[in-house]
Image: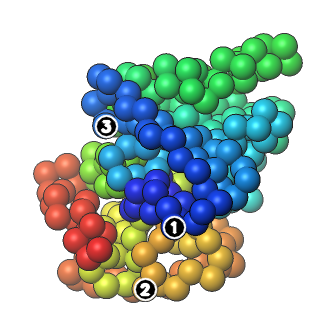
Amino acid sequence: MIEFTTAADYCGRQDKRIEYREPLTIAGSPFDVAIQDVYLGSTPVRLYLSGDAIFSGMYLDRNRRDELVFDYTAAYDRMFQAVEARRVLMIGGAACTYPRHCIRKHPNLEFTVVDADPYAEEIARSFFFLDEFMEDMEQEGGERLKLVTADGRTYLDQCGERYDAILNDAFVGAEPVGTLATVEAARRFRRCLAPGGVYMTNILASVTGRAGRFLRAEVKTLREVFRYVCLFPATLGTSPDEISNWMVMASDASLSVPDAADVRLSREDLVLTDADMPSALLGAVADVL
């Protein structure tokens, strides 16, 4: 998820270079999903929307479909600096744009994507050319992308696999998924990681102020479970008081993150638990916009 904004706001409706088609609503999806085609300059892009949030974007040019539209998504590539990742789990896959990007770049990578929306795979196949990608993978000699329809927390609770990296990009609209943010969930993430593995999550927030309440609570919660937890901006140069995409990385192995942000925690910052997950924290960013 890129920003707490509508597709029209993100692209700048006042820009006369941008042309729109009305969004196509996916009937039956429990997550208020719609598909919208836009032009960014002269470049056609397809967006995967949920409520007021953009979940995924894809260039419609066949030769660019596995490139990343949004800069924040590339921040997940930092996992490869932390661990030699061969098996990756992503919770919240939407159109599978990031897994496809990774698989193209890393020939030995296997990717499992878990999404709670029962329509997610059908949407990816029907509107984001997933069938075409899968056929390419078969011709190259392997099934390297596995799709699972399941609640993320339920999958973790039942998971018997070990992954080198686990990426949490699950949202409900613009809000994070509370069941994946608690100390109990962190223990399950840790249990599903191979030795030296890394967990990453993307949080829309600031570091300081009211809009950073959930982010600081999540950092504090992860520090209850993992030896090393750090935070860095998805976009270089982002100020700690700026609402943007921030990446939290956690591991039991030492992490080297030169642009890590200084997170000052206080007694007011909570350790989140299954029994104590204040709903106000999940909407902390919306409260200040």
Q: Position of residue 157 (x, y in %)?
A: 34, 32
Question: Which residue corresponds to mark 2?
Answer: 241
Question: Which residue corresponds to mark 3?
Answer: 32
The image quadrant of residue 153 is top left
Give the crowd class for mark 1: few <14, some 14-19, many >=20 residues within 10 Å: few
Using the numbered discs, state the Cα–Cα distance from disc 2 to disc 3 in whole angstroms: 30 Å
State left or right for residue 289 relative to residue 88. Answer: left
Instruction: Tell me: residue 170, above or below residue 40.
Output: above
State left or right for residue 137 relative to residue 251. Answer: right
Dot 3 amino acid type: Asp
Dot 1 amino acid type: Gln
Residue at 29% x, 22% y: name it: 28
Q: Nearer the viewer, mark 2 or mark 3?
A: 3
Q: From the viewer's side, name the closer residue of 10 and 102.
A: 10
Residue at 65% x, 55% y: name it: 40
Question: Is residue 229 visible in this depiction of the protein?
Answer: no
Nearest to N terminus: mark 2 or mark 1: 1
